[in-house]
Image (tube, grey):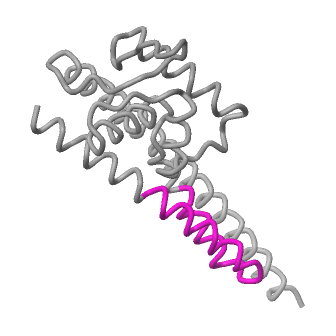
Amino acid sequence: MVELRRLLDNRARINERLSELRDTVRVLGRSLHSDKKRTEQLMNALDELSLYTPRLTTAVKDALYWAFASHGHRRLSATDVKQLMEVRRYDFSNCSNSLASVHSTLRRLAKQGEIGFALEKGAAVYFWKGPIAHDRATMLAVDEEQRILMDRKIRERVNQRLEQFSRRRLVLRDLKAKTFTRTETP
């Protein structure tokens, strides 16, 4: 359980740092409108960082874990969890209704028994149940699933880049061939 707690702490810190880096890259990208080469480099860096964006489920678990680890057995409403995720810089840009997404994720996790659920004054609150033996196996399975998805995304990205590179090589070869034939013709 000590190792699991350490790994969860590390994952939360890494996710937070990646969010900071994503924000920095976005800000830098806005200031480089005229320099196309640097803008392209920054956009590639942003693409690389987006590969490591945690899924919503992971971010919700991390927020509940962080609240538990830093403030003890704390119970949070869906709104509190969403606000904590925003403070921790989770990127909600892919969610049309971020609060509804967080709330449905919380309900699903509570129904699966991965997090705690209670009613306080008629309102639903959620809390981290803490790492216990079956949770560890579940979290390791989720991490393995994320690793597989990450590998798939990286392979797709590499294949896309290789295709772009091949297309550029063909274009350059055609340009050289055209240039060569022009200089050859009197």
In the image, residue 164 sits, relative to residue 28, either above or below, namely above
The C terminus, quarter of image: bottom right
- Work out which residue is located at the far left of the displayed protein and give it: 2
Q: Which sits in the foreground, 161 or 5?
A: 5
Q: Which sits in the foreground, 125 or 20?
A: 125
In the image, residue 9 sits, relative to residue 35, either above or below, namely above
Q: How many numbered markers are drawn?
A: 0
Is 73 placed left or right of 17 in the picture?
Answer: left
Taking the spot 57% from the left edge, 32% from the top edge, the residue there is 79
Q: Is residue 41 magenta?
A: yes
Taking the spot 56% from the left edge, 56% from the top edge, the residue there is 47
Taking the spot 34% from the left edge, 42% from the top edge, the residue there is 66
Is 155 placed left or right of 14 in the picture?
Answer: right
Q: Is residue 43 magenta?
A: yes
User: Residue 130: x and y, percent?
Assistant: 23, 26
User: Residue 137: x and y, percent?
Assistant: 20, 20
Q: Which sits in the foreground, 165 or 29?
A: 29
Is 132 placed left or right of 152 in the picture?
Answer: left
Res 93 quadrant in image: top right
- Specify start and end residues of the magenta stretch as a single range: 18-47
> What main secondary structure does the magenta stretch of the protein show?
helix
